[in-house]
Amino acid sequence: MKHTRRLMTAIPAALLGVALAAATAACQPANGAGTESTADVCADLNDNLPVYVANIAANPLNLGMYPANPSPADQAKIVSDTRASYSDLSAALREEADYAEDPATAAALLDTADRVDARASTINTVEDVSNITLANEVDTSPIDSVCSDNVLDRKSG
């Protein structure tokens, strides 16, 4: 089988990219061993998390794009997309925990991420999605203990 020069160049480049990504991930500080102050972490949360919260809040609204009785495939997609919204929020909280220099701040973020994951695990049907309101989503009190202006507390329901 004849391979083009472009393909033969792309394969090593892709492998190099994977190796660099793995090396970068290995260099990330462990939770509580980062370099950002709690104030910086809280500011980052306020800058970065609103989009994740908005995505969660939009999931019930997105149901209007489907027929009254969505097909099983559509129902699976709705549930999957909703769970992905929670997963994105959880990942953002965990990533920020990696940058926190204060172990208590990192622990609060990880605790909240665990709570987000637990909530996501309860989303199993389209009805579960339709019942989402920001007022009943996730207990964010661990972040309240370290961030005075917790963006996740700005709920309306």
Image (cartoon, grey):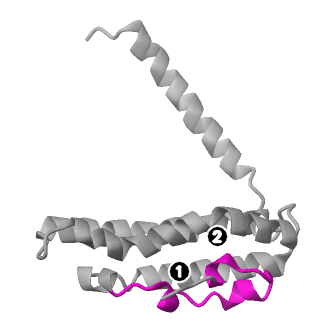
Q: Residue at x 85, y 72 (%)?
A: 38
* Of residues 28 and 126, the one drawn nearer to the viewer in this rendering: 126
Residue 84 percent location from the top left of the image: 42, 66
Instruction: Tell me where the magenta segment starts and ends, as one range.
Output: 131-153
| Mark 2 surroundings: few (<14), some (14-19) or many (≥20) residues within 10 A | many
Left of 154 or right of it: where is 67? left
Q: Which residue is mark 2?
A: 93
User: Compared to 145, does 1 lie above or below?
Assistant: above
User: Which quarter of the figure has residue 121?
Assistant: bottom left
Residue at 80% across, 83% down: 148
Is residue 149 on the magenta stretch? yes
Q: Residue at x 75, y 69 (%)?
A: 31
Q: Which mark is residue 116?
A: 1
Amino acid type for the residue under numbered disc 2: Leu
* Quadrant including the N terminus: top left
- Specify whether 13 is left or right of 2: right
Amino acid carrying label 1: it is Val
Counting from the top left corner in percent of width and height, residue 37 is at 88, 68
At 87% from the left edge and 61% from the top edge, which residue is drawn? 35
x%, y% of residue 61? 34, 73
Give left or right: position of 58 versus 142. left
The answer to whether marks 1 and 2 mark residues whose Cβ atoms lie closer than 8 Å is yes
